[in-house]
Every structure is written in C-alpha cells, then in structure tokens.
Image (cartoon, rainbow, N blue to C red):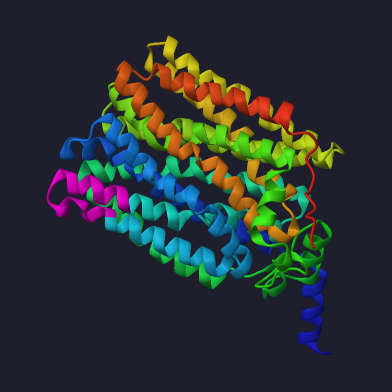
Amino acid sequence: MDMSRTASSANVAKRTKVRYAILLLIFVITTFNYADRATLSVTGSAMRAEFGFDAIRMGYIFSAFSWAYVLSQLPAGWLLDRFGARRVYAASIFFWSLFTLLQSSIGSLGSAAAAVTGLFVLRFAMGAAESPAFPANAKVVASWFPTKERGTASAIFNSAQYFAAVVFTPLMAWLTHAFGWHMVYVVMGVAGLLLALTWLKVMKHPADHPGVSAAELEYIEQGGGVVNGQQNAAPAGVEKTGGWSLVRQLLSNRMLVGVYLAQYCINVLTYFFLTWFPIYLVQARHMTILQAGLVASLPAICGFSGGVLGGILSDSLIRRGHSLTVARKVPIVGGMLLSVSIIGCNYVSTDWIVVALMSLAFFGKGIGALGWAVVADTSPREALGLSGGIFNMFGNVAGIVTPIVIGYLVAQSGSFNGALVFVGANALLTVFSYLVIVKDIKRVELRLR
C-alpha cells in the first residue's frame, strides 16, 4: 500500500482548521495596532509635564493620527484590491512600527515647539501607515470564513482593541513610571517590526495555503468565503468601471451610508477610550498614572468580553434561522443602548461606581461593535478592500473630531461632563442609524460596464 497516498487522502477527507490560526494572527496584529495608537494616551501626562502641552494642543496632537488615517483609507483600499492583503499589510505593520519607534526620540529635537511638531508629524505618518489594517482584516475574514462564522471572527479581531488595553495599558504605564515615557515607544516599535516579518511568513490565501485541506477549502467556499482573495487581478468589468464610479455606487447605497454613519458614532466611544480616558482618570478622578493604567484595563476587559459575546450571539441567531438583518442588528442596537450609561459618570462621585459605569458602557460597545462583520457581509466581492476602506474612513473621522471636541470642552469648562454627554449621544445616534437608515442587510451588487 502506498502510505503517502493514504496520508494524502486522509488529509483531503479531514476538515482542517487553519482559518483559526489566521484569525489568531490578525488578532495579535490588531492588538499591537491599537496598543501603538494608545501609546500617547498613556504617556501623555508625562509628556505634557515635560513639554508643556495644554489641553487644546494635546487634542490636536491626538487627532494627527486620524487625519492621515482617514485621508489614506481610499488609497489603502485600492492597494489591497490591487496587490492583496499579504504584501500591503506587511508594509503597513513595518512602517507604523518604525514611526512608533521614532517617537521615542522627539525629546532630542531641542525645544518644546520642535517636540510638538515632531510628535504631530510622526503620529500623522503612523496614521497613514496603519490605514490598510482594518480593511485588510475584513478582506482576510471574507476570504477565510463562511458567512455563519464571520460575525464571531470579525468580533474577535475587533475585540483586540480592548485586549490591547488590558495587556498593554498597564505595561505601558509601568514602563513610563519605571523607565520614562521614551521606553514605551522603543518596546512597542521593536515588537511591531518583528511582527511584520511573522505576517509575511505565515499569511497566504486559503486556496494557496499548504495546510488547508480540500474539505476546509470547500467548507469556506460553499459558505460564502472568497477563497482566492481576487489576488492581483480585478474581475472582468471592474477596471472599465473605474475607481471613482465604484466609490459613487457604494456611497449612493442607503444601507451602506447608514452603516458608515453608525461606525463613525461607535468610534467616538473608541477614540475617547484611546485618547482622553486615562487623562480623565488622572485629572478628573485624581488617580496616579499607575492607578489609571490598572483601572483603564477593567472597562477594557468588559469591552473584550462584550465584543466576543456580540459575535457569538450574532452568529448563533443566524444558525437558529434568523435573517442576517436581525442577527446583526439585535446585538448592535442592544449594545449601544447599554453604552449610553457612560453619561451616568457625571452624576456619581465614588470611583468604583465610575469604573462600573465605564465598564458597562464598554461592555455594551463591545457587543455592538459588529460593523466589520456587516462590511464583510455587504461589501461587493469585486471591491472588498475599497468598501472596507470607505467604511473605515467614515468611522475614523471620529478620531479627528473626538479628541479635538473633548479638548475644547475640557479647556472651556474645566471638567469632563460635557465630554461624556457628547460620547453618550453618539451611542444613541448609532441606534438611530441602524433602526431608521439601515434597512435589510445584504451584499451589494455592483453595476459593471
């Protein structure tokens, strides 16, 4: 008997689970992605003391990342559709990690004004470098997972933003306290450079991956996965249609516009947490940087738990026979209603109640953060990267608006009360968007010439 042939036949018959290893990889990468974004929120108090930033200037520095991140989304989406997630994502990880590492040296620029300018420029460059990350995640999930598993997969990689806070916020707070703020950027930058090499080594499309059995490949493809990833080649008709025509079609779709608006509102909560939350704990609640680092991890744990639960709940509704519309909207609407509880922090003075309300708000935000699953469900197969880029562009306008608005509100009132109302109101607007603007959730078909 030919033993090699027997082993090969067994491999074909057995359904492998390589897709879970790919999901773990993008989860780890997304954890570093959000940790690098949040470095300034942890080191901000120490840097303000060293360089003399006021609240308004700090708000603008916080927003530098998102200016570039938003402006780069359409080019990033086009690059992903043209060159594939493997190469584009590798370059993205490498360059954002390099710019993170360089932020450790801004103190050597001499004056405080030069340090402010240098920090703004490097945060801006980091935002441009990170722009392909989430569209690439959505493209990978659309390739590797069938529809009935996509909600959980998307929720897991999206919940990495909370896991980053759980793991890295206390670590970065300790590094700042023990070695100075510079060391945070050195550690995170070097780790990211190593991660870029890991991605290049491991990542392939399902149809090309040597570890994927025929049974797993068939399971993914029959379940709606784009197993070939449309690698390096646009489908017939797309090139003739033209990039801007595709953009116009996506932006003229009512369902997608509602999803885009909702993602902006959800990201207001995200960027409050990534930028001002540790400073809120230090300034408004009078905690030390070490205390703030530990306390910030508690809402993050709740957000992570809610994120995973939201995806599992959504996919379980699909398996029970509910429509995709019901399965996605129920967790989103319910979760965002819970997030409104953040406003309650204005009416309590006890720290543990504040932490409990913040934790409830971010638990709800985690449950409701299914936008990337919706993108994977609805994006045209011919333009997965572009559609994800537009979605991410709209969502991350919140990264420009939120830190600046909160900076002005804090500077003018001397408190964070108005800021928390602003954040809670955006949670309600998310509910409105999904209930009123978004109708049925279904895949968009492009008109190709």
Spot occupied by residue 6 in the image (x, y as percentages of width and height) = 81, 82
Residue under the point 54% across and 21% down: 425
Q: Main secondary structure of the magenta part?
A: helix
Q: Is 249 placed above or below 98 here?
A: above
Quadrant holding the N terminus:
bottom right
Q: Nearer the viewer, residue 176 or 381?
A: 381
- In which image quadrant can residue 128 be found? bottom left
Spot occupied by residue 282 in the image (x, y as percentages of width and height) = 29, 27
Spot occupied by residue 446 in the image (x, y as percentages of width and height) = 78, 55
Q: Nearer the viewer, residue 379 or 13?
A: 379
Q: Is 213 placed above or below 442 here?
A: below
Spot occupied by residue 179 in the image (x, y as percentages of width and height) = 20, 47
Q: Nearer the viewer, residue 407 or 219?
A: 407
As for residue 96 lying within the magenta part, the answer is no
Residue under the point 66% across and 69% down: 205
Quadrant holding the C terminus:
bottom right
- Give the residue furthest to the right: 321
Asked whether residue 325 appears in the rendered view, the answer is yes
Q: Nearer the viewer, residue 264 or 321?
A: 264
Query: Which segment did they paint magenta?
Result: 103-121
- In which image quadrant can residue 353 be found? top left
Residue under the point 23% across and 45% down: 116
Q: Is 152 placed above or below 23 here?
A: above
- Left or right placement of residue 267 versus residue 297 in this view: right
- Give the residue furthest to the left: 110
